Amino acid sequence: MGVGGCLVLPWRCLVVLCLRLLFLVPAGVPVRSGDATFPKAMDNVTVRQGESAILRCLVDNRVTRVAWLNRSSILFAGNDKWCLDPRVELVTNTQTQYVIQIKDVDVYDEGPYTCSVQTDNHPKTLRVHLIVQVPPKIVEISSDISINEGGNISLTCIATGRPDPMITWRHISPKAVGFLSEDEYLEITGITREQSGAYECSASNDVSPPVVRRVNVTVNYAPYISGAKSTGVPVGQKGILQCDASAVPSAKFQWYKDDKRLSEGQKGLKVENKAFFSRLTFFNVSEQDYGNYTCVAYNQLGNTNASIILYGPGAVHDGNSDGSRTVASVWLLSVLLFHLLPKF
């Protein structure tokens, strides 16, 4: 394509025009080594999309005619503008340099530009290549995803830019180290709960600061009770049993004493359920309150439970041991006594 709105001529018409102007030459005629530094044009010009490109051709007083071309399009011939594109302007036309400017450059402006001069009836040309750089832009990225633990996921991040941007994926986590992928795609098989969180896609090509977008990955898993400690409380005092559980989605809780479910509103008892724990509060502990309590945590992926004992000051109990182990020990002792007593 090239600079838009410029006059594009068939080859034969261009040849006729060249003969009339006495200085334009057919494409492909190089500057001979004997011509050395004349005409002098700048090296390849690199600009960012949206910026202005300056095309400069250095000449001297031997030049009688001069022009800038883009492929087969004449941009300027001397002071005369042949291009209809308002972005193209003549900046300087003196005995030492011939300069044009292309404003608000876009990718279709990229390509070869030719400075053609006439001197001593010998036409000469020199070509400059305009390179247009484009900042990276993420045009497609995966949506936030929710998956059950053990499943597989594939995340996609597509970006454009000139030069082609480099894409990297990383897990936004204190335990994460380095990049997970240096590709448009990130594959995770057998995902675990520790791999949940934000995943960041970064696209960079050194034209501008990297472009960053994130995908949130939620890993669902069944409840896991991480804390359930038995408690000793004297009669008449306030007692609290607490059950901590992690789960996604958040766990719901139920409390039981023996086979009886406990509920909010029972006299002297308060049940408080939060996202990650449930608390059972006795405002005035009595002898009847002592015993084994079961905390059940559940969501749609499964359930788990733990036994917690509320005991008095005279009870023999290892307060640091798990409640379920205590109950299991009591049950085992009962079984042993049952088998040993008949022998006596």
Image: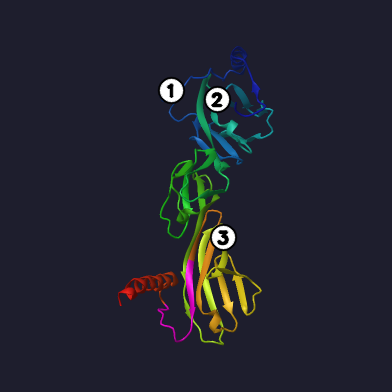
> How many numbered discs, if any?
3
Distance from disc 2 to disc 1, alpha carbons, whole Å, reads 14 Å
User: In this orientation, which residue lies closer to the viewer: 223 or 86?
Assistant: 223
Mark 1 vs 3, N-terminal side: 1
Q: Residue 135, how many percent across, how many down?
A: 55, 43
Q: What residue type is labelled 2?
A: Val
User: In this orientation, which residue lies closer to the viewer: 216 or 33?
Assistant: 216
Q: Taking 6 as reference, is 162 left or right?
A: left
**Which residue is depicted at the point 58% across and 38% down?**
53
Q: Which amino acid does label 3 sit on?
A: Ser
Residue pointed to by mark 1: 32
Mark 2 vs 1, N-terminal side: 1
Is any atom of residue 61 visible in this view? no
Distance from disc 2 to disc 3, alpha carbons, whole Å, reads 78 Å
Residue pointed to by mark 3: 250
For the magenta stretch, what is the residue range? 306-319
Q: Are marks 2 and 3 in contact (CB under 8 Å)?
A: no
Residue pointed to by mark 2: 117
**Which residue is depicted at the point 52% across and 44% down?**
207
- Position of the N terminus, as image quadrant, is top right
The kind of secondary structure element at disc 1 is loop
Q: Is residue 31 magenta?
A: no
**Which residue is depicted at the point 52% across and 68% down?**
295
